[in-house]
Amino acid sequence: MKRKQKHNKDLVIHILCIIACLIFMYPLIVMFRKSLSVNGFKNYSVVFNSMTLHKNFFNSCFIVGSVLLIVFVVLSLSAFAFSKLEFPGKHILYYVLLMGMMMPTAALVFPVFMTVKQFGMLGSRFSVVLPYAALSTCFNLMMLKNYFDTLPDALMEATYIDGGSNFKSFIYVMLPLAKPGLAFTLIQTFLLSWNELQLAMTFITDKAKLPLSVIPIYFSAKTGSAQFPVQVIFAALIICLAPIAIFYVFASRFMVEGMTAGAVKG
């Protein structure tokens, strides 16, 4: 009897999940169908022949790759330090950094714009690299620091007995064990940096240097023209959406593992 009730409960949950999936997928299905109307897959060839999407795709890869490199180095070291080391002002500095999560991006646009302008980076790809890395640090620092907290201090003590330093303990012991948490933070950073729109539109004016996420804005301004009919615009949107969708399909498993791994440690 209990097994039957559990089976019925699982069946209801699966049905609800399928319905929710169809609801979220419906706009994408409509977009794909519209992109094939009139000329079929020729709409996609029109997009590639008339736009510089390959340059914009490279820009996105360059920007996101630079952000991930900075976040990996800074975030892993700082999370380890806040979790396992003792230094003056540790707790105050940690909570000051967490206060950054309370600041909306819109409120930071002008001061960041002036800072980027003073450094002479305005209009370049680097103008968004450092802001992206800084804006994604606060939340991810909290997540990764909490993950390091779940790792026993005895592992570091064993390293000290063997003559190792804090840095060796971090590189050879703690960092490999923190891979699930680090994978989650890097994937989170990738998704946020790839999809970010506001700062890229504000800091970069050259279309050839824009990331792929901003290009649909330029498409919408030309909707209905002879060169860009509606079906071509939908084809362009599908092309812009494809890389991040493919990445999420393969990376979602690691995100779930990273979020749940800390819950079963201790």
Image: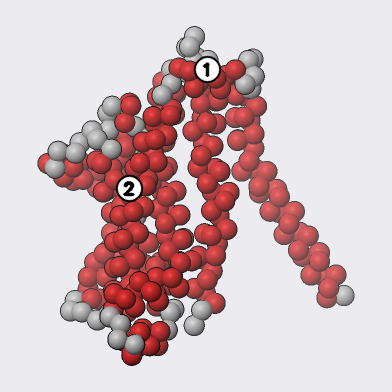
- Residue 73 is left or right of residue 37, and the answer is left
Q: Residues within 10 Å of mark 2 (few under 14, many from 20)?
A: some
Quick one: 213 or 60, which is closer to the camera?
60
- Residue 109 is left or right of residue 42, and the answer is left
Residue 63 position (above or below residue 97): above
Q: Residue at x 42, y 64 (%)?
A: 182
- Residue 223 is left or right of residue 214, and the answer is right
Residue 104 position (above or below residue 85): above
Task: Between label 2 and label 1, give the one nearer the viewer.
Answer: 2
Q: Residues within 10 Å of mark 1 (few under 14, many from 20)?
A: some
- Residue with the most extreme right position: 1
> Label 1 sits on what residue type?
Val
Q: Residue at x 24, y 81 (%)?
A: 86
Which element is circle 2 on? helix
Q: Residue at x 32, y 37 (%)?
A: 200
Location of mark 2 (residue): 66
Location of mark 1 (residue): 46
Q: Position of residue 18 (x, y in %)?
A: 71, 50
Which element is circle 1 on? helix
- Residue with the most extreme bottom position: 161
Q: Image quadrant for the N terminus?
A: bottom right
- Residue with the most extreme top position: 226
